Image (spheres, helix red, strand yellow):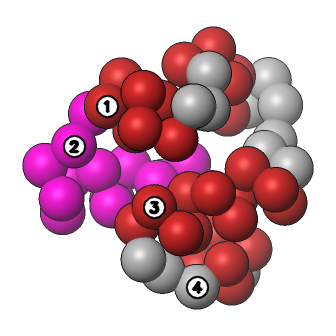
Amino acid sequence: MYEKFERLLRERNLTPYRVSRDTRIAQSSLSDWKRGVSKPKVDKLQVLSDYFGVPLTYFLDE
C-alpha cells in the first residue's frame, strides 16, 4: 500500500507532511505504514482515496 501512496506523492509533488496536514492523518501513522509496523484501516484509506481522487480499490488491490 505504501508504495502506491509514495507513487501518488511523487506524481503530485506532495510530501507526507502536507498530506498529513490536509487529511488530519497523523504523521506517525504514515510513518508506521511505511515501516510496516501497522496497516491502515479502511476509513483512513478512504480519506486518502478521496484526497488523491482515486478509487478505494487503488489502495486495496495488491
The numbered mark, 1 or 4, whose residue comes first in the sequence reads: 1
Instruction: Give the vertical position of 22 relative to 26 (above or below).
Output: below
Q: Is residue 38 left or right of residue 9?
A: right
- Looking at the rendered structure, which numbered label has been put on residue 55? 4
Could one spot residue 18 in this view of the protein?
Answer: yes
Location of mark 3 (residue): 51
**Quadrant the C terminus occupies:** bottom right
Relative placement, left or right, of 39 versus 57 is: right
- Could you say which disc has been placed on residue 30 in the image? none
Disc 1 residue type?
Arg
Indicate whether 57 appears above or below 38: below
Cα gap from disc 1 to disc 3, whole angstroms: 11 Å
Mark drawn on residue 14 = 2
Picture quadrant of residue 18: top left
- Residues under numbered marks 2 and 1 in contact, where contact means CB atoms less than 8 Å apart: yes
Give the residue displayed 67% in from the left and 78% down from the top: 56
Rendered image quadrant of residue 35: top right
Q: How many numbered dots are placed on residues in this image?
A: 4
- Which residue appears at 62% of the width and 21% of the height? 26
Spatial CA span between label 4 and label 2: 19 Å
State how far apart marks 4 and 3 are (Cα): 10 Å
The numbered dot on residue 18 is 1
Q: Nearer the viewer, mark 2 or mark 3?
A: 3
User: What residue lies at 74% left-to-right and 74% top-to-bottom?
Assistant: 60
